[in-house]
Structures are given as structure tokens and as C-alpha cells.
Image (cartoon, rainbow, N blue to C red):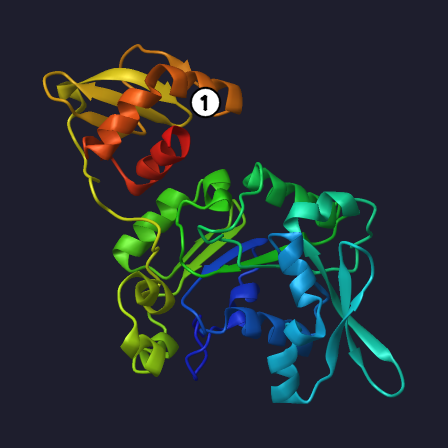
Amino acid sequence: MGIYLDNGYLNIEQILSYGVPFNFIVGGRGTGKTYGTLKTAYIENIRFILMRRTQAQCDLINKPEFNPFKALNNDTGSNAIVKSISKYNAKIVEESEEDERLLGYTCALSTIANMRGFDASDVELLIYDEFIPEKHERAIKNEGSAFLNAYETINRNREIKGEKPLQVLCLANAFNIANPIFLELGLVGRCEKMKNAGQEIFIDKERGVCVVLLQKSKISKAKADTALYRLSSGSYADMALSNDFVYNNADNIKSMALKEFKLLCTVGEISIYKHKSKRLFYVSEHRTGTAPIYKSDEVNLQRYRKNHGVALYGAYMRNNIICESLLTKSLFELYTL
């Protein structure tokens, strides 16, 4: 059985069956990511936490009008509703005339640190919905680390006690391949290779990671002939249907011979070279030569920008920066701009 059901929607049960703790699913709109995950949790009686990035987003799904189970209630006749527990989280229950059945909880990544006393030992699945932020969304400081801390808060010492680790399903539309979590976990390069090769699934059992990039969804193909997508074109359709990462482009990405360049500096995971005869810079993961090294913490980045920022920003604006890969380009933009 593959990652798609016969009707073309995503097969969440199959993805969970791979048995790895960390699962990342990036796909076009309406392909069954959130709906399929909630349906699987409901039918299989899997206790879950539904997490969003910000408290404002969490507060929204805690309102009856934005109940994440609304579509599933309509389709199955269930009666799952959200009830507030505290300022920061709520519980999702199925109500009947006799009693209520606890299905799961809600929380926000930005405020989960305030819930460290919360006992989540009954939770089997963390659903992190819309984990890739859109450009207009406010950044969360050290977002990648915050995600790992959230996992630790919920998982605690399960494996030490001989229990299975908490499983995570991170779901998103294809906005930015160089998102905070992929950067933190070193998955940008892997996803870039998957996208270029048309590969839909990658599993690393040793690290406990599964990455799914939906590229052959029958639902996306069917949606291409609907009113919205006949009207729209360009980046929105690329993201929503083709699962192209719309905030990333491949301009000025190519491999160049380092012998033509001299090392200018290293910052974080990238090294920046200046051409020996042309007004050209090259950004690579490989370091050859002797030059200043700046770590990727805020103090070192300020030093890097003070010493090199003006020249490199000018070169970037003049299209004189060549990057070895989408990863190096994304890191250069993150550190420099």
C-alpha cells in the first residue's frame, strides 16, 4: 500500500505504520493532510495534541466556528468539540447524551513552555499543523529549538521507561523549503534532492525521520480544473497544486570551481568566497583556505554583518552572488539579509 488512498487522498495510516517518530508531510492544499490525520486519530482512537505555531492561531481553532473537526463531524456524524482548559490550551472531546470521550488537546508552539507541568503521558501523537510559516507570519525566536523543546515537554522519559517514543506528524503547504524546522534538523538539502528527483518519500530509520513531499497527487491534478486555479497562475498555483516551494527560487544556483575564488569568511554552515578577478562571490558548504569564522549565534552574526554585510548585500542586489545549492542560498539570505 502506498502513500495515497484509492480516492487520491493522503494515506496517513500508512505513513504512521512506518514507525518512525518524526514525520514531515508537505503537500498541496486539499490533499488530505489535516483531515486525514484527524480522521485517522479519531477512528483509531489515538490520543493526540493538535499544535499550531502561535497562540493566536491556537485560540482561533479553539472557537466553535473554527473547530478543526467540523468537516469530520459533517462527514461521519461525530460530535467532536473544543473546550477550553486554560489560557494556553483546550481539550477536544466527543460529546454524547451520556458522557464525553476525550480525543486530544490543543496548544501553541510559541507558548508551550508555559505548560511544562502539563501531564501528556496519555498522548500518542503530536500533530503540528501548518509548521511552515507564510512570509507575513511573525517569526518565533529559535523556532527549530522551540519545536524540539515542545517534543521533549510532551515525550518526557518514555523511552527510558521502555515505552514507545511520541510520534509526530508535521503538516504544511510548500511555502519555504528552508523553514526553521528543516534548517534545525538538516533536512533542507535532503528535500532539495527529493524535489529535483521527483521523489515523494524518504525514510531514515536510524534518525527516526520520514519526509513526504506530495508530487503525484490525483487530487491536485483534479483541482487544476476548478474555478480558482483556472483563474490563478504563477506562485499560488505552484504551491497549492504542484507543491513547489514558492518562497525559494533556483536563480544563481550552480556549482563552481573553488580554485577561481579566495575564501572571504565562514559563517555558520557556509563559506563565502570572492572571485580572484571578477566582482563575484560564491557560497559553498565546503571550506578551503584561511579566513575569519563566525558562528551562527546572534553576537557572531552581528560581527559578520558589520564586517561583510554592506559589500555582500550590494553584491546580492546586483545579482553577483552564486550559490552552490538552495540550502547555501537560503542560509546566506538568512545570515546576511
In the current view of this chain or complex, which residue is farthest to the right? Answer: 98
Residue at (52, 19) in percent of width and height: 299
How many marks are shown on the rendered structure?
1
| Residue 250 or residue 21, whichever sits in front | 250
Classify residue 219 by image quadrant: bottom left
- Position in image of residue 321 (x %, y %): 22, 31
Instruction: Report the quarter where the C terminus lies.
Output: top left
Look at the image and tell me whether residue 123 can be seen: yes
Examine the rendered structure and indicate whether residue 266 appears above or below residue 146: above
Query: Mark 1 — residue?
Result: 301
Relative to 127, 323 lies left or right = left
Q: Is residue 279 above or below residue 229?
A: above
Is 149 situated left or right of 268 in this image? right
The image quadrant of residue 147 is top right
Three-letter code, disc 1 = Leu
Residue 52 x/y as whole percent: 61, 57
Q: Which of 330 and 302 is in front in this view?
A: 302
Residue 199, percent from left and from top: 32, 59
Q: Residue 13: x and y, percent?
A: 56, 71
| Image quadrant in which the N terminus is located | bottom left
Residue 125 shows up from this direction? no
- The residue nearer to you, when weighing 131 against 258, is 131
The residue at the point 43 percent across, 72 percent down is 2
Single out the residue that lies furthest toward the left: 277
Other residues around mark 1 within 10 Å, as few (<14) / some (14–19) / many (≥20): some
Q: What is the quadrant of residue 267 in the picture?
A: top left
Q: Is mark 1 on a helix, strand or loop?
A: helix
